[in-house]
C-alpha cells in the first residue's frame, strides 16, 4: 500500500516517522515560489508530504497540479488521488468545478492586488508601507478567498497548511513573485526617472 494512502489513516505516525524538519513545507513553498512554478515533481512531493501529514484535500490539489504539469508517473499519481479522495468524507471538495472555483478566486485576488499595487506606484506611494494597503484590505481578505468546502469543513489550522493551500490552489505564489519582480523594476525605473 502506498505511503500516502496509509498516512490518511495515521497522519501523525506516518509524518513523524519521516523525521522531517519542521520547515519542510516552507522549503517546498520557497522552491515553488522562486522557481518557475512549473515543476511537476515539486507538486508531487508536496502532495506526498501533505498526504503524510493527513491533509487529503491539499494533497489531492497538489497531485492534480503535478498531473497538469505532465508528471511522468501520472498513473501512480491518479491512484494516489483516488486514495486520498476515498479517505475524506467531503467528496464534493475534490470535484473539478470546486477546484476551478478556488483557482479562479485566487487568480482574481492576485489580479486585484496587482492592480492596487500598480495604482500605488503610479501615485508615488511607498509599496513597502503597510498603511498604504489599508484600503485594499478593507475590501479584500489578507488571505486568498475560499468559496469551497476547504474553508468550511477543513480549515487551515496552521501557517504551513495555509501556505500549502495557496500553492496548491493554482500556483499563485510564482505569479506573486513575478509580479513583485516586475513592480520592483517599475519602481526602480520610476525612481530613476524622478517620478
Image (tube, rainbow, N blue to C red):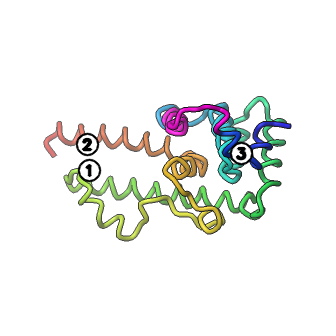
Location of residue 151 by image quarter: bottom right
Q: Dot 2, how many residues are within 10 Å of its Cα: few (below 14), some (14-19), or many (20+)?
A: some
Which range is magenta? 16-32
Above or below residue 125? Residue 72 is: above
Residue at horizontal 67%, vertical 34%?
A: 17
Horizontal placement of 185 versus 153: left or right? left
Q: Secondary structure at mark 2?
A: helix
Q: Earlier in the sequence, mark 2 or mark 1?
A: 1
Q: Are marks 3 and 1 in contact (CB under 8 Å)?
A: no
Q: Earlier in the sequence, mark 2 or mark 3?
A: 3
Tell which of 100 and 15 is nearer to you: 15
Question: For the N terminus, which image quadrant?
Answer: top right
Above or below residue 45? Residue 176 is: below
Residue 188: image x %, image y %? 24, 38
Residue at horizontal 73%, vertical 34%?
A: 70
Q: Are marks 2 and 3 in contact (CB under 8 Å)?
A: no
Horizontal placement of 52 versus 20: left or right? right
Q: Mark on residue 187?
A: 2
Mark 3 lies on residue: 64
Residue 158: image x %, image y %? 51, 53
Location of residue 116 by image quarter: bottom left
Distance between mark 2 and mark 3 Cα atoms: 36 Å
Mark 1 lies on residue: 127
Q: Secondary structure at mark 1?
A: loop
Asked whether residue 186 is drawn in magenta, I would say no
Q: Dot 1, how many residues are within 10 Å of its Cα: few (below 14), some (14-19), or many (20+)?
A: some
Tell which of 11 and 91 is nearer to you: 11
Res. 62 visible in picture: no
Residue at horizontal 59%, vertical 49%?
A: 170
Above or below residue 84? Residue 98 is: below
Q: Are marks 2 and 1 in contact (CB under 8 Å)?
A: yes
Amino acid at each position: 500500500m502506498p505511503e500516502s494512502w496509509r498516512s490518511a489513516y495515521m497522519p501523525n505516525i506516518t509524518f513523524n516517522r519521516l523525521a522531517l524538519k519542521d520547515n519542510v513545507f516552507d522549503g517546498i513553498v520557497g522552491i515553488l515560489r522562486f522557481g518557475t512554478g512549473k515543476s511537476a515533481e515539486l507538486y508531487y512531493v508536496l502532495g506526498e508530504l501533505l498526504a503524510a501529514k493527513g491533509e487529503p484535500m491539499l494533497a489531492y490539489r497538489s497531485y492534480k497540479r503535478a498531473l497538469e504539469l505532465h508528471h511522468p508517473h501520472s498513473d501512480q499519481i491518479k491512484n494516489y488521488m483516488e486514495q486520498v479522495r476515498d479517505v475524506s468524507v467531503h467528496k464534493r471538495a475534490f470535484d473539478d468545478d470546486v477546484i476551478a472555483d478556488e483557482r479562479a478566486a485566487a487568480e482574481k485576488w492576485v489580479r486585484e492586488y496587482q492592480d492596487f499595487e500598480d495604482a500605488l506606484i503610479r501615485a508615488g506611494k511607498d509599496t513597502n508601507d503597510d498603511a498604504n494597503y489599508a484600503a485594499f484590505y478593507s475590501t479584500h481578505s489578507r488571505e486568498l478567498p475560499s468559496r469551497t468546502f476547504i474553508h468550511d469543513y477543513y480549515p487551515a489550522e496552521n501557517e504551513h497548511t495555509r501556505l500549502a493551500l495557496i500553492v496548491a490552489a493554482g500556483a499563485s505564489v510564482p505569479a506573486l513573485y513575478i509580479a513583485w519582480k516586475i513592480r520592483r523594476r517599475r519602481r526602480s525605473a520610476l525612481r530613476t526617472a524622478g517620478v
